[in-house]
Image (cartoon, rainbow, N blue to C red):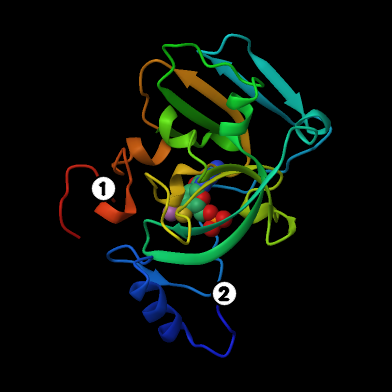
Amino acid sequence: MFNKVFGRREQEDAVRGMNRLPPGQSLTQKFPVLHYGPTPNTDLATWDLRVFGAVEEEVAWDWEAFNKLPRTKLTLDIHCVTRWSKFDTDWEGVSLKTLVDEGFIKPKPEAKYVIQHCEVGYTTNTPLDLVLQDNFLLATHFDGKPLTVEHGWPLRGVIGAFPDRSEKKSAYLWKGGKWLRGLEFRADDQLGFWERAGYHNEADPWQEQRFAGDRWF
Ligand SMILES: Nc1nc2c(c(=O)[nH]1)N[C@H]1C(S)=C(S)[C@@H](COP(=O)(O)O)O[C@H]1N2
Ligand SMILES: [Mo]
C-alpha cells in the first residue's frame, strides 16, 4: 500500500493514524533477521513436520506431503519485541485453522496449548485458540518467494495483525518459530525458549506485554 517515495517517518505516521502501530514500536522498511543461535542446514530429503501430543492421531508430513496440504495467502503487520514493526508483509503457506477445520489435525478435547518445536532447540508456546486464528500461518513463502534460510526456510510460524486489525488477538513475532519441525498439542502450558528467559507469556503487542512481571518500558 505504500509508495516508495514516502520515507520511513511518513509511513510510520500513516500507520499510526490507522491504529496499526502498537505502543513503543517503530516502523522499519527493512526485514531484520532476529534469532538466537546458528542458522540450521536443513535437508528437504529428511525434513518432516511432526504433529504430536494431545491429538487423536499423530502425523508426520514429509516435504512433498506438506506441500499437498491446502494453501493460504495473507497479509500481516508483524511486530518484534525489540521494537521494530513491518507492515503489509505478504505470506503464503498452510493455515493451522484450515488443517483443523478440514480434519487433517484432530486436537483432543483437552488440548489447550501448542508448542512450536524448531531446529536447534528453539520452542515457543501459545494457547491453541490463538494459533487457530486466521492471523497465524505455517509459512513457506514471503513476498511471493520461498523463505530465505535466515527467515526460516523451509517452514516457519508467523503471527501478526491484519492491516484492518480485524484479528481478535495478536502476538509479538517471537511466537512464530523459524525452521519449524514440530507442533506439540498439550493440555497444560509449557514455557518456550524466550518465555523461560523472561519474556511475557501472552506477548500482546497492543498491551506491550514484552517481559514477564513488568508493566512499563
Ligand atoms: N527458531 C527460531 N525462531 C525464531 C527465533 C529464534 O531465535 N529461533 N526468534 C524469534 C524472534 S524474537 C523474532 S522477532 C522472529 C524474527 O523473524 P525474522 O528473523 O524473520 O525477522 O523470529 C522468531 N522465531
Ligand atoms: Mo523478536
Q: Earlier in the sequence, mark 2 or mark 1?
A: 2
| Quarter of the rendering occupied by the N terminus | bottom right
Q: How many marks?
A: 2
Q: Residues within 10 Å of mark 2 (few under 14, many from 20)?
A: few
Secondary structure found at label 2: loop
**Image point (49%, 33%), residue name:** 132
Q: Position of residue 42 (x, y in %)?
A: 73, 40
- Residue 127 visible in the current orientation: no
Query: In the picture provided, is 168 more to the left or to the right than 40?
Result: left
Q: Position of residue 2 (x, y in %)?
A: 55, 79
Residue that label 2 marks: 1
Which residue occupies the foreground of this view, 108 or 58?
A: 108
**Image point (44%, 65%), residue name:** 85
**Image point (57%, 62%), residue name:** 89
Query: In the picture provided, is 153 more to the left or to the right than 35?
Result: right
Kindly identify the amino acid type of the residue bearing the numbered disc 2. Met
Q: In the image, which disc is placed on residue 211?
A: 1
Residue 83 image-quadrant placement: bottom left
Query: In the picture provided, is 43 more to the left or to the right than 159?
Result: right
Which residue occupies the foreground of this view, 37 or 141?
A: 141
Query: In the picture provided, is 60 more to the left or to the right than 5?
Result: right
**Image point (17%, 49%), residue name:** 214
Split into quadrants, the picture shows ligand 2 in the one at: bottom left
Q: Position of residue 68 (x, y in %)?
A: 80, 33
- Residue 148 visible in the current orientation: yes
User: Is the distance from the Cβ of mark 2 to the nearest ligand 1 atom less than 8 Å?
Assistant: no
Which residue occupies the foreground of this view, 141 or 71?
A: 71
Q: CA distance from mark 2 to mark 1?
A: 32 Å
Outermost residue on the bottom side: it is 5
Kindly identify the amino acid type of the residue bearing the numbered disc 1. Phe
